[in-house]
């Protein structure tokens, strides 16, 4: 009886460890990648940046800075690249420095665009910085 119980316990331990290994891999969180983009935005202008997404998931796009006029609003969007165009899956037309846009992105080439929504009228070009955190 003791040998049977010991054998059952060993078998259970082996199965538990094997199942634990096979089940834990898909559930492990992916490492996030952070990319920074910067450029200049002009009146009625837009700038697009592309990046590679390894795994489907949420991306956070933060407008880090606008200079020298940080009190203006701009539009931002994120999506996927198709036929050479940034096809937006999320956008916001009233972004200010420090604000974040969230978008669900699929694996492949993705894009972020920043654009004038009319607040740059009569102003000199502004410099911007964006931070994109994705999988």
Image (spheres, helix red, strand yellow):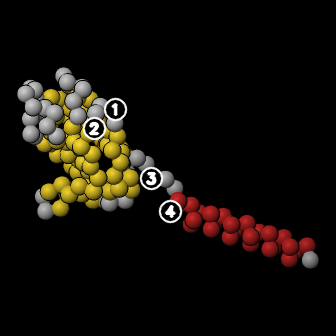
Q: Label 1: which residue?
A: 98
Image position, residue 108 (x, y; %): 27, 59
**Label 2 vs label 3, nearer the camera:** 2
Q: Is residue 135 left or right of residue 25?
A: left
**Label 4 vs label 2, nearer the camera:** 2
> Secondary structure under badge 4?
helix
- 10 Å crowding of disc 4: few (<14), some (14-19), many (20+): few
Which quarter shows the N terminus? Answer: bottom right
> Secondary structure under badge 1?
loop
At 74% from the left edge and 70% from the top edge, which residue is drawn?
12
Q: Label 2: which residue?
A: 95
Which residue is at the far right? 1
Q: Label 3: which residue?
A: 30
At 27% from the left edge and 38% from the top edge, which residue is drawn?
95
Q: Is the residue under label 3 in contact with that under label 1 (CB below 8 Å)?
A: no
Q: Is residue 55 visible?
A: no
Q: How much space separates mark 2 and mark 3, taking CA atoms?
A: 28 Å
Relative depth, front residue between 127 and 94? 94
> Secondary structure under badge 2?
strand
Q: Label 4: which residue?
A: 26
At 38% from the left edge and 52% from the top edge, which residue is drawn?
58
At 49% from the left edge and 53% from the top edge, which residue is drawn?
29
Relative depth, front residue between 42 and 24? 42
Q: Earlier in the sequence, mark 2 or mark 3?
A: 3
């Amino acid at each position: 009886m003791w040998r049977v119980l010991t054998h059952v316990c060993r078998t259970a331990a082996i199965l538990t460890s094997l199942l634990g290994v096979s089940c834990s891999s898909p559930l492990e969180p992916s490492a996030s990648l952070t990319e920074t983009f910067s450029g200049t935005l002009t009146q009625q202008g837009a700038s697009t940046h592309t990046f590679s997404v390894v795994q489907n998931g949420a991306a956070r796009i933060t407008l880090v800075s606008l200079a020298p006029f940080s009190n203006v609003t701009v539009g931002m969007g994120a999506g996927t690249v198709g036929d050479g165009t940034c096809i937006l899956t999320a956008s916001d037309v009233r972004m200010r420095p420090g604000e974040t846009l969230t978008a669900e992105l699929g694996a492949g080439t993705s894009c972020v665009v920043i654009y004038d929504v009319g607040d740059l009228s009569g102003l000199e070009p502004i410099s911007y910085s964006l931070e994109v955190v994705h999988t």
